[in-house]
Amino acid sequence: MVIRGRAPLRVSFGGGGTDVAPFCVEQGGAILGSTINKYAYCSIVPREDDQIVVHSLDFDMTVKYNTNENYVYDGKLDLVKAALKAMEIKAGCEVYLQCDAPPGSGLGTSSTVMVAMLIAMARWKGIMMDGYRLADLAFQVEREDLKIAGGYQDQYAATFGGFNFIEFHGRNDVVVNPLRIKKEILHELQYNLLLCYTGNVHVSANIIKDQVKNYEKKDGFEAMCEVKALAYAMKDELLKGNLNTFGKLLDYGWESKKRMSSKITNPQVDQLYEEAKSSGALGGKLLGAGGGGYLLVYCPYNVRHKVAERLEAAGGQLTDWNFELRGAQSWIADEHRWDYGQVKVQMPDKEYIFHV
């Protein structure tokens, strides 16, 4: 038996950073975003002994623990140790982890891995958790138990999936509003958006700490208020299907976001963004906290190919993607279906045998 958990990575369009305390507690935050068809996976294979063996497939790393382990957070697979502790895993197992994007890419990878682990462990233990309980537990483990700086959006986006307008007023006061967007609008939006990897990853905690510090300053506070207002405006224009207006608001949001911290952008990102705009893009933004990772660019269909060419010529790496409307999922894979042997097919004139 293999228990699997999968959670989708996310892109945020507006409101990024307003989900971080103290702003979201004192002013209320709002995020407009969607999940995409890039995922974090967790596979659990029960063992007969008391060993917990964790395999990080992305980093080619294997670490072994005992079921009675007194977990110490030392920077080595701390997310896994915290999840095992939170879910009170006391049985031996093999845990396999894999993610479709690297840490620091701006797609919410660490939180999405956490959600994938928790939903797989819950399935194994027969624990039923609704979306809010799962997302809140993921937030608690990452932000409170591990003390990793960050906001609320990643855990809720990965858990619920799809297009959501999420409002934040602090822990246990998060409301996920699913958006009903016409299919033709979603298809057109996806076609007009380019996802470009800048080649650099970032340490989001450092950027978030700088953003929190700037919250006490007038310009930083006003920038965050504007970013929040833009999230509401972008949500309205998206629901109406005014996609070019939506694209221009992305540009407004990016300019406002950069005022929240000097660490949000860098010369390479600025160059890529200017190349995109000079070739016809209406707007865009760096995903996540900033500093590197993925750049999202909106361009009308008739200049899409030009923008793509300019981005690649400037060193960007375009990524194939699409929207994912489903959230975190878990299932059980029957490993007996993987047995090798013979496959026989009887055709009218002959029997075929395939050795597999």
Image: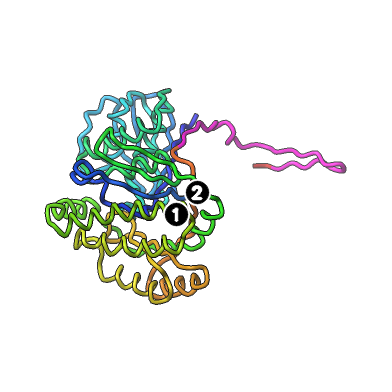
Residue type indicated by callout 1: Leu
Residue 351 occupies which quadrant of the picture?
Answer: top right
Cα–Cα span, label 1 and label 2: 8 Å
- Left or right: residue 40 versus residue 356 is left
- Name the residue: 23% across, 32% down: 71
- Name the residue: 54% across, 56% down: 187
- Name the residue: 38% across, 43% down: 157
Disc 2: which residue: 181
Expressed as whole percent of the image width and height from the top left, the position of residue 130 reads 40, 29
Disc 1: which residue: 238
- Among numbered discs 1 and 2, the one appearing first in the sequence: 2
Q: Nearer the viewer, residue 205 or 241?
A: 241
State the colouring used for the structure image. rainbow
Expressed as whole percent of the image width and height from the top left, the position of residue 348 reads 86, 41
Q: Is residue 81 above or below residue 313?
A: above
Does residue 59 appear in the picture of this structure? no
Residue 167 occupies which quadrant of the picture?
Answer: top left
Expressed as whole percent of the image width and height from the top left, the position of residue 257 reads 26, 59
Q: Secondary structure at mark 2?
A: loop
- Left or right: residue 349 versus residue 271 is right
Question: Which range of residues does the magenta coloring cover?
Answer: 329-354
Badge 1 crowding class, 10 Å Cα cut-off, few under 14, some 14 to 19, many 20 or more, is: many
- Whether pointer 1 and pointer 2 mark residues with C-beta atoms closer than 8 Å, the reply is yes
- Left or right: residue 213 versus residue 270 is left
Expressed as whole percent of the image width and height from the top left, the position of residue 143 reads 23, 39
Residue 166 occupies which quadrant of the picture?
Answer: top left
